[in-house]
Amino acid sequence: MKQQPYSCCDVPAAVEPGEPSGVCSEKTPAATAAGTESGLCPVSATTGLKVDLITLKALLTGDGLRRLNGEKYRFCPAADCDVVYFDNAANSVFRPRDLTVRIGLKETADSAPICYCFGYTTGDVRRDFATFGTTEIPTIITAEVKAGHCGCEVRNPQGSCCLGNVSRAVRPVPAELADALPNSRSESGAERVNP
């Protein structure tokens, strides 16, 4: 029997009623700390998400790798916190400057990444809504994940599937655009292009 390729989204997770099974949702497979001191970010006191060492090894700069001395790192999801990874037991902290990629969750610019595997940004979502009134980006990413093409465990700084982040990035855009351009919605015949 041919073994299926591993996908970060293959991690079994509890499925909520009405959620599709086998596809990532807004609930990431990374487990959160159970409120223990070691699971709280030393700066924001936010509960960190567990991250495998392979994620850090893939994304840290050379200088960052030389300082990698912890074993149980967590990702700080607080948007306003400068800490990306921490291991309190090892007194080890990494900040955005220690990584080779931008941390989309900690940025507000349109160029902020929301999908590290397929290169989508917040700006891509905004352009789709401004041009088409909707976006197919979550659908495109879901199809790629189902095909086994994602590498979120080593490309996404969270070390888990990005679809939850994509959904959170998409949700406010229609209202933001409506507030910015009242009564100026136009229909466009432009064709959608994937990056």
Image (cartoon, rainbow, N blue to C red):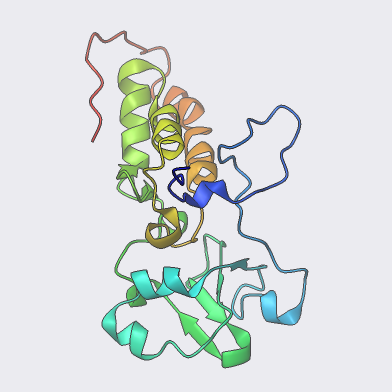
Horizontal relation, residue 179 to residue 26: left or right: left
Residue found at x 57% / y 62%: 78
Residue 43: x percent and y percent?
59, 78
Say which of 136 and 181 sits in front: 136
Identify the image quadrant of residue 31. Answer: bottom right
Residue 164: x percent and y percent?
55, 43
Residue found at x 40% / y 24%: 135
Considering only vertical position in the picture, is 72 above or below 180? below
Considering only vertical position in the picture, is 103 above or below 114? below
Considering only vertical position in the picture, is 78 above or below 194? below
Residue lying at the far front in this picture: please name it. Answer: 1
Residue found at x 24% / y 8%: 189
Say which of 190 and 25 sits in front: 25
Horizontal relation, residue 10 to residue 145: left or right: right
Tally the numbered discs. Answer: 0
Horizontal relation, residue 40 to residue 43: left or right: right
Say which of 137 and 20 sits in front: 20
Residue 159: x percent and y percent?
48, 61
Identify the image quadrant of residue 104. Answer: bottom left
Considering only vertical position in the picture, is 127 above or below 75? above
Residue 10: x percent and y percent?
55, 47
The quadrant of the picture occupied by the C terminus is: top left
Horizontal relation, residue 127 to residue 17: left or right: left
